[in-house]
Image (cartoon, rainbow, N blue to C red):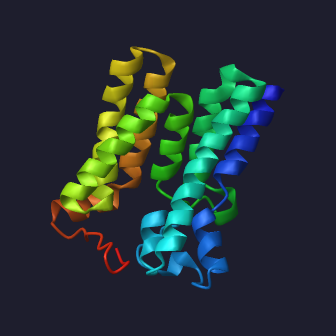
Amino acid sequence: MLFFIIIAFSYLLGSIPFGLLVTKFGGEGDIRTIGSGNIGATNVLRTGRKGLAIATLLLDTVKGMAAVWIAQTYAPEVAMWAGLAALIGHVFPVWLKFKGGKGVATSLGILLALEPLLGLFCALTWLATFFAFRISSLSALVAAAFAPLFAFILLGDEPVWLMTLFMSLLLIIRHKANIVRLLHGEEGKSKLKNGHA
């Protein structure tokens, strides 16, 4: 029973659409009508409000961490599944007819809470790729591709490795439209100096 309670709670926690809430309370309207229509931090940045984008990034990351931490407190053996439930909640939120974000920040929070070094390696990979190419989606895809490798090197053939592989595949699938644009050279770069992406 405790397992199902934690999983349900983690899903509901993950499904909180912080990007949508932050932009509405910030006076920017419905983020789903802006740019790509995604509720993640990258699309929030398209409003020109860096503060709102940072808030979305942090909140989406923290909800992934919180799901794992809460599970670790009450039922440590459920922590990995709680993280996955939070990610699925973010990507398929019940409140938004199961149309959510791509899961990059939430995945990072989950990995940081489960295995901090693994999360750090993934974050550094994202940052290195972003500073080299200034393309958020490419950075996410590169980090997702390397995450299972990092997990295997750090942890060996353990359940967390399989979880990381699943998360990476989900993130890559969620970026399929971005992959098409990247292949055609049509994916936009982030222009942080003027606050737009």
* Left or right of 74 on screen, residue 121: left
Task: Examine the rendered structure and indicate whether residue 12 appears above or below residue 193.
Answer: above
Q: Residue 126 at x, y = what percent?
A: 32, 48
Task: Examine the rendered structure and indicate whether residue 109 appears above or below residue 40.
Answer: above
Q: Residue 68 at x, y = what percent?
A: 64, 35
Task: Examine the rendered structure and indicate whether residue 46 appears above or below residue 166.
Answer: below
- What residue appears at the point 51 percent right and 81 percent down from the top-left corner? 33
Is residue 63 in sight in this rendering? yes
- What residue appears at the point 56 percent right and 45 percent down from the top-left corner? 87
Is 81 or 128 nearer to us in this picture?
Answer: 128
- What residue appears at the point 60 percent right and 84 percent down from the top-left corner? 29
Q: Residue 90 at x, y = what percent?
A: 58, 53
Q: Residue 175 at x, y = what percent?
A: 36, 55
* Left or right of 13 on screen, residue 173: left
The quadrant where residue 162 appears? top left
- What residue appears at the point 51 percent right and 36 percent down from the top-left corner? 112
